[in-house]
Amino acid sequence: MADLNIISYNVKGFNAPSKRCQIFSFLKKRLTSVLFLQETHFRFNRYPDLSRSSFPVWYHCGSSSSASRGVSIGFSKRVPFQYSLHTQDPEGRFLLLKGTINNRIYTFINIYAPNVDQVSWFRNLITLIQPLLEGLVVLGGDFN
């Protein structure tokens, strides 16, 4: 595997099967390797099964207090991602995954930033994640 083709997409809700079908069809045509989804509207610990033959591996972060947030990261079957660590926001605003792909360390961070008080939110986020960053850092999301 030479290149990672990464797509970041604010789906504005990902609970409808018809919307999921449209997006997965779009991704397949673009040979997507890693997918960052924002605003999935998934509740904490209530995630639909997004596994497909082309995207079998998923990690989610939902909100415990609101269904208007949520982020997910999906890996294509062509990406041999070996998970080692994750951290997430209890409000469904970010998900950090660390692992290896072909013995190279990656840190993937997917963000769905708030519309208000962004400066302090990003300061807090950087303070939290900075000690966890290692290897190639891939940052994506909706920064509002």
Image: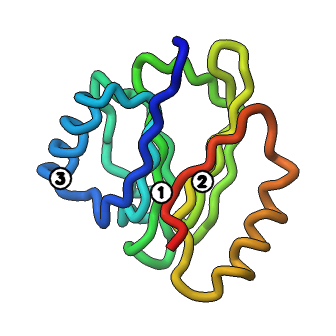
The foreground one among 90 and 128 is 128
Left or right: 14 with respect to 56?
left
Give me the C-alpha separation between circle 1 and circle 3. Answer: 16 Å
- Say which element carries label 3: helix
Instruction: Compare marks 1 and 2 and give the one earlier in the sequence.
Output: 1
For the question of whether residue 44 can be seen, the reply is no
Amino acid type, label 1 = Val
Residue behind mark 3: 19
Query: Image height check: is 30 above or below 26?
Result: above
Amino acid type, label 3 = Lys
Instruction: Compare marks 2 and 3 and give the one earlier in the sequence.
Output: 3
Instruction: Compare marks 1 and 3 and give the one earlier in the sequence.
Output: 3
Left or right: 92 with respect to 8?
right
Question: Pointer 1: residues within 10 angstroms few (<14), some, or many (20+)?
Answer: many
Amino acid type, label 2 = Leu
Query: Image height check: is 38 above or below 20?
Result: below
Q: Mark 2–mark 3 contact, CB under 8 Å?
A: no
- Say which element carries label 1: strand
Q: Mark 1–mark 2 contact, CB under 8 Å?
A: yes
- Please name the residue shown 71% across and 14% down the image: 103
Q: Position of residue 46 (x, y in %)?
A: 39, 57
- Please name the residue shown 78% across and 73% down the image: 123
Circle number at residue 39: none
Residue behind mark 2: 95
Residue behind mark 1: 71
Give me the C-alpha separation between circle 1 and circle 2. Answer: 7 Å
- Say which element carries label 2: strand
Task: State which quadrant residue 24 falls in.
Answer: top left
